[in-house]
Structure formats: structure tokens, C-alpha cells
Amino acid sequence: MKNCLSQAVFLDRDGVINAPIVRAGKPFAPTSREEFQILPGVEQALQVLDQAGFLLIIVTNQPDVARGLIAREVVEDMHGYLMNKFPLDDIKVCYETEESGSHYYKPQPGMLLDAAKEHGIDLSKSYMVGDRWRDVGCGLAAGCFTIFIDRGYAERILQVPHARCGNLQEAVPIILSHSRD
């Protein structure tokens, strides 16, 4: 049982939980269940965070659904797998494109704000972990401590995260240490 429902770790999906498909230095979401590969160390990292009492919530942009590149059912199948395999409390998804102007499409903080209302989360005591500039921007806009997983993509990070690391396993001690301060 969770002993502290007021803190959450928000996790981007592609590049944090599962391996992205990288083309020309840019990351893309997998478009089939076969391409959907969990990154090493994710299960252990999530177990440690769960045992520490954090709510674990994936927040992910999936604009390829709106673009017709993947069926929503395929994405939902991936998410069903994640919910069954890991100690996740929720998965929030924005199926729209950036051009839609949605307040849910990261870097907008809509998914985090909704999750905070639904789960009673104190965003100022919570964390956003992601591998793209959009994740950092989203976390900062919501008032979270941000951790950037640097995968060396060919894109700039537009805002400065609170911390940087190489994968989710490396993010865990940063979160645990910061939450004790």
C-alpha cells in the first residue's frame, strides 16, 4: 500500500519506459507491439519508486494516432501490457498533434494537472522524468522537479531541467535523495 499519495513520479513513455525507434538522430514511438521493447532496468526502478510510496503515472504524447500511423487500439494494447506488468497507477495519453493546440500535448501541463486532481497529487513535491525537451517543459509548467534522461538525440533541450541522467535507473537515486531534502 502506498504510504504517501501526495507525491508522484510522472514518466514519459517512449525513451523512459520503452525503447524509442531512432531515425536520423530523432526518436519516434513504436508503431507495433513487436517494436514495443521495455528498456533494461525499468522494472526494478519502478518497483523501488513504488515501494518508496510514489504514485507512478505515465504521461505520453501519441500524435501518430491522429496522423493515422498507428491505431488507437494498438497504443491501448501497449498500455494494457504496461499496467499489468508494472506497479503503475495511471497512464495519461494525448492522442492529438501539436498543431491541435491541446493543453494536454506536452509541453503543456494538462495531463499532469488532470492527474493531480484525480489522484490528490501535490505537484510541487512530484517529479517529471523524460527524454525530450517537451517533458522538461511540461514538468516545469506543472511545478514539478524535472529529470532529463539524455539519450543524445539530435534536438535541443529548450529549458534547463533540475537534473540529468542516462536512464530511469539513474533517475531513482536522484528522486529518492531529493524527496528526503
Image: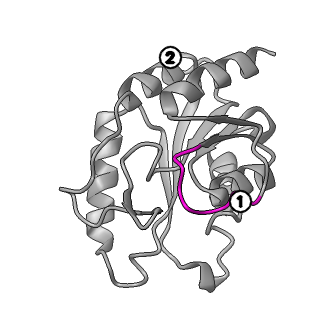
Mark 1 falls on what kind of element? loop
Residue interval drawn in magenta: 150-158
Mark 2, Cα crowd under 10 Å, few <14 / some 14-19 / many 20+, is: few
Above or below — where is 134 with respect to 99?
A: above
Which numbered circle lies on residue 175?
none
Q: Nearer the viewer, residue 113 or 101?
A: 101
Residue identifier under label 1: 109
Q: Secondary structure at mark 2?
A: helix
**Visible residue check, residue 4:** no
Residue at left offset 35%, top offset 38%: 39
Q: Which amino acid, mark 1?
A: Pro
Answer whether residue 154 is magenta in the image: yes
In this rendered view, identify the residue nearer to me: 79 or 26.
26
CA separation, marks 1 and 2? 26 Å
Say what amino acid the circle numbered 2 marks: Gln
Residue in the picture at 63% in, 67% down: 104
How many neighbours does mark 1 have within 10 angstroms: few (below 14), some (14-19), or many (20 or more)?
Answer: many
Percent coordinates x, y for residue 87 in the rendering: 41, 31
Residue 51 image label:
2
| Residue 44 located within the stretch drawn in magenta | no
